[in-house]
Image: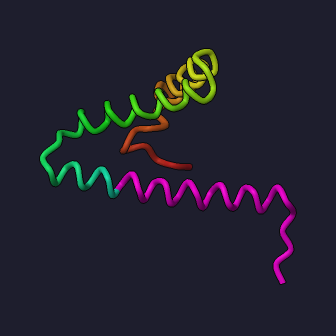
């Protein structure tokens, strides 16, 4: 029998939802590419859609803080395709 505490179970559910979301995004991305939409257009519209939803839900100040955090992660190379995990 698996004994998971509430927070552990919540974390597992969130991780699973994120994995499914990634799969949805990858499928939509592949569909867009196969329809001839450039990656820059796909990326910009994905970011715009996400930011619009986040601002609607959390407000501009929270989203600006999130974007500042993302900027730092970009500067540290977190999103480089050639980065190595240690």
x%, y% of residue 72? 54, 23
Seen as rendered, the residue at the extreme bottom is 1
Residue 24 horizontal/vertical position (percent): 41, 56
Height in image: 78 above or below 63?
A: below
**Residue 5 shown in magenta:** yes
In the image, 54 versus 1, the foreground residue is 54
Quarter of the image holding residue 2? Answer: bottom right
Magenta span: 1-26
Residue drawn where x is 53% and y is 23% of the image: 67
Query: Which residue corresponds to the image point at 58% horizontal and 25% vertical from the top-left?
Result: 66
The image position of residue 81, as x and y in percent, is 37, 44
43 lies above or below 16: above
Most foreground residue, 49 or 39: 49
In the displayed structure image, the side of residue 42 where residue 25 appears, left or right? right
Name which residue lies at 42% across and 59% down.
23
x and y percentages locating residue 70 in the rendered image:
52, 27
Q: Nearer the viewer, residue 65 or 50?
A: 50
């Amino acid at each position: 029998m698996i004994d998971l505490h509430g927070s552990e179970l919540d974390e597992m559910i969130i991780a699973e939802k994120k994995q499914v979301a990634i799969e949805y995004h990858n499928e939509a991305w592949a569909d867009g590419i196969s329809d001839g939409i450039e990656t820059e257009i796909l990326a910009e519209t994905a970011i715009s859609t996400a930011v619009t939803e986040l601002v609607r839900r959390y407000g501009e100040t929270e989203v600006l803080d999130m974007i500042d955090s993302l900027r730092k992660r970009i500067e540290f190379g977190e999103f480089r395709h050639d980065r190595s995990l240690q």
